[in-house]
Amino acid sequence: MSGRSSALAAARYAASFALALALIACNRSTSCDSDQPSVLSFASAKMRVITAADTLRILTELARTSEQQTLGLMERKCLADTAGMLFVYAKDQPASAGFWMFRTLIPLDIAFMDSTGGIRAIQHMVPCTATLVQGCQSYDPGVPYRAAVEMNAGYFSQHRVVLGDRMLLADTSRLVKGISPR
């Protein structure tokens, strides 16, 4: 990326964050209920995680637009035990397209999936205390992916979710494009 493109992208992120932070200040909540106020409205969908020993049910908020994907779980003080955020893309994302934890207050785990819901990578992410996004670590999956789910830190290990397990996206396939309902 050229210096000019990089500066332009940084300026866009800064403007998005400034707007988001101003709105968040007016909508803070300590509740972990599904009706927790958010700067942006997120549709939600039920998902199932299929492991060797169990089928887990989770409720995800859908980050479909670039604004929703940029905001993600920023400024949330808590996340319900079986809640998460699903990021879905219209095409495969490169192995180097990671996630950051800028202004994210709670530690998270993230599972990166292929277009059929197969889990290809899992990362543990810690909150970033930097005041600028450039100071935050990027959590790259190391594999191409089509979707990612953020959950509370420890969720995947606690429930023995491992690489090769599947997230059934059938409940979300009619709400987002780019994924298979399997």
Image (cartoon, helix red, strand yellow):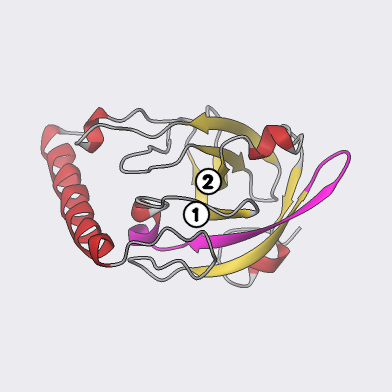
Label 2 sits on a secondary structure element that is strand
Name the outermost residue toward the front: 30
Q: Quadrant of the C terminus?
A: bottom right
Q: Is residue 106 left or right of residue 11?
A: right
Question: Residue pushed farthest right?
Answer: 53
Q: Which residue is mark 2?
A: 92
- Image quarter where the N terminus lies is top left
Numbered range of the magenta stretch: 50-68
Tell me where residue 82 appears, x and y as whole percent: 65, 53
Label 1 SS: strand
Residue topped by disc 1: 89
Question: Quick check: 127 above or below 82?
Answer: above
Q: Is residue 133 left or right of residue 80?
A: left
* Residue 58 drawn in magenta: yes
Which of the pair 119/136 is nearer the observer?
Answer: 136
What residue is shown at x 55% (from left), y 39% (from top)? 110
Identify the residue at image location x=29%, y=32%: 129
Q: Amino acid at mark 2?
A: Asp
Q: Are marks 1 and 2 in contact (CB under 8 Å)?
A: yes
At a point 46% along the width and 62% down the height, the residue shown is 64
Query: Which three-letter amino acid code belongs to the residue tagged 1?
Result: Tyr
Relative horizontal placement of residue 44, taking residue 127 as reference (left or right):
right
Q: Nearer the viewer, mark 1 or mark 2?
A: 1
Which residue does the image show at 17% across and 33% down from the upper left?
2
Residue 18 on image: x %, y %? 17, 55
